[in-house]
């Protein structure tokens, strides 16, 4: 949602004293994503294929904001798969502002049962043996 959206979200979060909660940390960018994602109750992110594979493997509920600047809208299509099974909320950037994101986060964090259901739905999309399947295909191609 860009710099202006981030600033609006932070302003509203400050008004709501969001960062005073012991389990909330706001970051514009995260450099150690695997650790942070693993510890999160709710992930807010783009919808690239690797990110979504990580969400599924970890069973993390998410708010997905697909990048509108990718070829053939593949991030939107990726996010829709997660949204359709109930693993994520899909928010399009063109409709985003700080209030929309804040309200969505608040609704989800206020509903542990919904987060749990979203987590189960995310896990249902995981392919934990993907490396074995890839090796099988490669072996077939080589023989």
Image: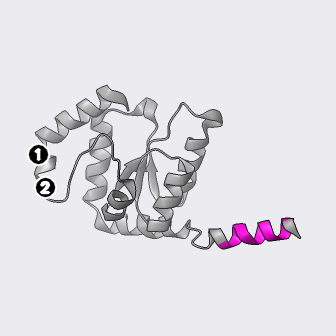
Viewer-side residue, 115 vs 126: 126
Residues tagged 2 and 1 counted as in contact (Cβ below 8 A)? yes
Residue at horizontal 54 percent and vertical 53 percent from the top: 50
Q: How many marks?
A: 2
* Frontmost residue, 14 versus 32: 32
How far is mark 2 from mark 1, CA to CA? Answer: 7 Å
Image vertical order of residue 96 relative to residue 133, above or below? above
Residue drawn where x is 35% and y is 48% of the image? 31
Q: For residue 95, which quarter of the picture?
A: top left
Q: Which disc number belongs to residue 17?
A: 1
Residue 29: image x %, image y %? 33, 42
The residue that mark 2 highlights is 21
Image location of residue 35, percent across then percent down? 34, 61
Left or right: 66, with 98 as reference point: right
Q: Residue furthest top?
A: 4
In the picture, measured across the screen, residue 132 lies left or right of residue 116, that is right
């Amino acid at each position: 949602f860009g710099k202006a959206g981030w600033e609006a979200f932070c302003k509203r979060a400050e008004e709501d004293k969001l960062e005073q909660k012991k389990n909330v940390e706001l970051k514009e960018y995260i450099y150690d994503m695997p650790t942070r994602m693993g510890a999160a109750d709710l992930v807010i992110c783009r919808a690239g294929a690797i990110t979504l594979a990580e969400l599924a493997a970890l069973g993390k509920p998410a708010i997905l904001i697909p990048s509108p600047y990718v070829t053939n809208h593949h991030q939107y299509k990726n996010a829709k798969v997660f949204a359709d099974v109930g693993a994520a909320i899909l928010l399009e950037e063109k409709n985003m502002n700080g209030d929309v994101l804040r309200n969505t986060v608040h609704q989800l964090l206020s509903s542990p049962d919904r987060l749990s259901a979203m987590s189960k739905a995310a896990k249902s999309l995981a392919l934990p043996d993907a490396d074995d399947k890839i090796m099988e295909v490669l072996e077939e191609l080589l023989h």
